[in-house]
Image (cartoon, rainbow, N blue to C red):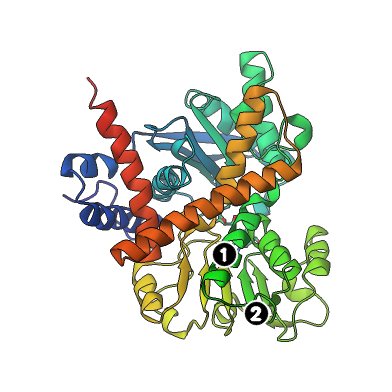
C-alpha cells in the first residue's frame, strides 16, 4: 500500500520514504507480525498549525508548524523542534519515527515525537523568533506537557528557544513547569552537560569504535560537517582526544588544514558570529568538497541527505559517525558498507542528546540535580551499553550496523505494543 504522504518529490518525502523503508527492512529481518509492522508505518497523531508573526516591518507573515507523535507506547513523546525552510509534515514524521527507535534503542522510557516550523531564522530578528516561538507553543499546547510530550532543541533552536517555550507553557497553566522541555539553561531547570551531550556521546562511540578496530586515536584524522551544537562539541572532543581535526564546515562553507585546525580558537570565532571558512590561515572548501577529504573519521553533524549515491563512491573514511539525523541515504549506506566503512548510525550516534534530555527530565521531575561527573558517567554508560548491544547483533545476525540498531529499537517497541494489546 502506498504511504499516504508520498506524492510530489521533495526532501521530506525522501526522508519519510527512507524511514518507512528502514522499518520495512528491519521488520522483515525480525519476522515482525505484519499487523504491528503496518501500525508502526504511521504516526499516532500529527498536528499542523499556522503561526502568524508580526514582523519588524509591520507585516504579518504566516508560518506553518508541525508537531508529530509517531509512537508513545514506551512513554511520553520526545523529540526536538526544528526551525528551517525545509521543514514539512513528511520530514517531521520521519524524524519522529527515528526518535521512537532511538529512545527504545537507548532503553529510555520515551516515545518518538518531533516538531518544527517552516521558517528562515537567519533572516529573522530575535523579537520575531521569540514571537514565532511563543505562538507556536500555544498552538501545540494541547499536545505537550511533562507527562505527554517533551520537546527539545534541534536545528536552529537552542536553550533560549526552550526557555521561551517553557515560559509560554508555564504562563498558560499558571505555575512554572520546567519539565515541559529539555535543553534549557541550567538556571531555569536545565541539566549540566545537556548542551554538550550529543557531541560527547558521539565521541564516546567513536573512541569505542577505534578500540574495536584496534586503532589509536592519536594520529587519526577527522572531518566534521556542521559546526553548531553537535558539530562543534564533536570537533572539540575529538581534538581534546588527540585526534587531528583537518576539516570543519558550517552552512556557509568549510575550512581545511591538513596539519590540523585550531578547533578551540575556531569555536570562539564562531561564537562571536564568525564563519569557519573565514578563520585566518585555513583553506576554504565547499561542503561538497569537505565530505570527500580523505580522513579516518567523518562526522556529518548538519543536515539530512548529505551523503548520497552520487558522492558515496568518493568518500574515503574508516568511520562514519553520524551526528545529524538522516545524513546518509539508503543507497549511499550500501555503497559505504561495501567499502567496509564502520558506520555509527544516527539513531545510535546522536542519541547522547536524548539521553541527557532524559536526565534533565528526571532531575526536573524529582527536583534533585546531579553534578556533571554523574551526568557524563551515566551518559557514557548508556552510550556504550547500546553500542555493545548493536555490535553483538551485528556479529550474531551479520546485518549492517544501521539495521542492527533499528532492529533493537523496533523490537522493543513492538514487544511493548504486543503486551499492551490493541485498544479497545
Ligand atoms: P545547530 O543549528 O546548532 O547547527 C547546525 C550546523 O550545521 C550549523 O553550523 C549550520 O551552519 C550547519 N549547517 C546547516 N545546514 C548545513 C548544510 N546544508 N551544510 C553544511 N552545514 C550546514 O544544529 P544542531 O543542534 O547541531 O543539529 C545538527 C544535526 O544534529 C541535526 O541533524 C539535528 O537533527 C541533529 N541532532 C541534534 C541534537 C542536539 O542535541 N542538538 C540531537 C540529536 C540530533
Which mark is drawn over residue 97?
A: none
Q: Measured from the top left, where is residue 104 in percent x and y?
A: 42, 43
Q: Residue at x 29, y 27 (%)?
A: 420
Q: Measured from the top left, where is residue 158 in percent x and y?
A: 67, 45
Residue wearing tag 1? 208
Rendered position, 375 above or below 291: above
Number of residues whose C-alpha sits closer than 10 Å to that of mark 2, classed few (under 14), some (14–19) or many (20 or more): many
Disc nearest the viewer among 2 and 1: 1
Determine the quadrant in which ligand 1 lies: bottom right
Q: Residue at x 66, y 71 (%)?
A: 249
Q: Measured from the top left, where is residue 132 in percent x and y?
A: 62, 37
Number of residues whose C-alpha sits closer than 10 Å to that of mark 1, classed few (under 14), some (14–19) or many (20 or more): some
Q: Which sits earlier in the primary sequence, circle 2 or circle 1?
A: 1
Relative placement, left or right, of 388 versus 180 is left
Relative placement, left or right, of 240 versus 60 is right
Q: Residue at x 34, y 39 (%)?
A: 413
Q: Quadrant of residue 150?
A: top right
Rendered position, 311 above or below 70: below
Q: Measured from the top left, where is residue 206 in percent x and y?
A: 58, 66
Front residue of 293 and 54: 293
Q: Quadrant of residue 265?
A: bottom right
Amino acid at each position: 500500500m502506498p504511504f499516504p504522504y508520498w506524492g510530489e518529490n521533495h526532501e521530506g518525502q525522501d526522508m519519510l520514504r527512507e524511514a518507512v523503508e528502514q522499518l520495512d527492512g528491519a521488520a522483515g529481518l525480525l519476522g515482525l507480525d505484519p499487523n504491528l509492522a503496518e501500525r508502526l508505518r504511521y504516526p499516532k497523531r500529527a498536528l499542523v498549525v499556522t503561526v502568524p508573526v508580526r514582523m519588524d516591518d509591520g507585516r504579518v507573515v504566516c508560518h506553518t508548524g508541525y508537531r508529530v507523535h509517531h509512537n508513545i507506547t514506551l512513554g511520553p513523546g520526545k523529540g526536538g523542534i526544528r526551525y528551517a525552510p525545509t521543514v514539512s509534515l513528511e520530514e517531521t514524521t520521519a524524524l519522529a519515527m527515528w526518535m521512537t527507535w532511538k529512545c527504545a534503542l537507548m532503553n529510555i522510557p520515551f516515545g518518538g515525537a518531533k516538531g518544527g516550523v517552516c521558517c528562515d531564522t537567519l533572516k529573522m530578528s530575535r523579537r520575531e523568533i521569540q514571537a514565532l516561538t511563543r505562538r507556536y507553543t500555544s498552538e501545540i499546547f494541547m499536545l505537550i506537557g511533562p507527562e505527554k510530550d517533551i520537546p527539545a532543541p534541534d536545528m536552529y533552536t537552542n536553550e533560549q528557544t526552550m526557555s521561551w517555550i517553557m515560559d509560554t507553557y508555564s504562563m498558560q497553566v499558571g505555575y512554572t513547569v520546567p519539565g515541559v522541555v529539555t535543553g534549557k539553561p541550567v538556571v531555569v531547570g536545565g541539566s549540566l552537560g545537556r548542551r554538550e551531550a550529543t557531541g560527547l556521546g558521539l565521541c564516546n562511540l567513536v573512541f569505542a569504535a577505534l578500540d574495536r578496530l584496534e586503532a589509536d586515536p592519536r594520529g587519526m584524522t577527522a572531518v566534521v560537517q556542521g559546526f553548531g551544537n553537535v558539530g562543534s562539541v564533536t570537533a572539540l572532543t575529538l581534538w581534546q582526544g588527540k585526534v587531528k581535526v583537518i576539516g570543519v564546515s558550517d552552512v556557509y562553507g568549510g575550512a581545511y588544514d591538513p596539519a590540523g585546525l585550531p578547533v578551540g580558537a575556531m569555536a570562539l570565532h564562531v561564537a562571536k558570529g564568525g564563519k569557519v571558512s573565514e578563520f585566518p590561515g585555513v583553506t576554504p572548501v565547499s561542503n561538497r568538497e569537505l565530505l570527500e577529504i580523505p580522513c579516518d573519521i567523518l562526522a556529518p553533524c548538519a543536515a539530512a541527505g548529505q551523503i548520497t549515491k552520487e558522492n558515496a563512491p568518493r568518500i574515503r573514511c574508516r568511520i562514519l559517525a553520524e551526528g545529524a539525523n538522516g545524513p546518509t541515504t539508503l543507497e549511499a549506506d550500501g555503497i559505504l558498507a561495501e567499502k567496509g566503512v564502520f558506520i555509527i548510525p544516527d539513531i545510535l550516534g546522536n542519541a547522547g542528546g536524548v539521553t541527557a534530555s532524559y536526565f534533565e527530565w528526571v532531575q526536573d521531575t524529582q527536583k534533585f540535580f546531579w553534578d556533571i561527573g554523574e551526568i557524563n558517567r551515566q551518559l557514557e554508560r548508556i552510550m556504550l551499553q547500546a553500542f555493545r548491544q548493536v555490535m553483538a547483533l551485528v556479529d550474531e545476525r551479520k546485518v549492517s550496523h544501521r539495521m542492527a540498531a533499528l532492529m533493537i529499537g523496533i523490537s522493543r517497541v513492538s514487544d511493548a505494543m504486543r503486551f499492551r494489546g490493541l485498544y479497545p
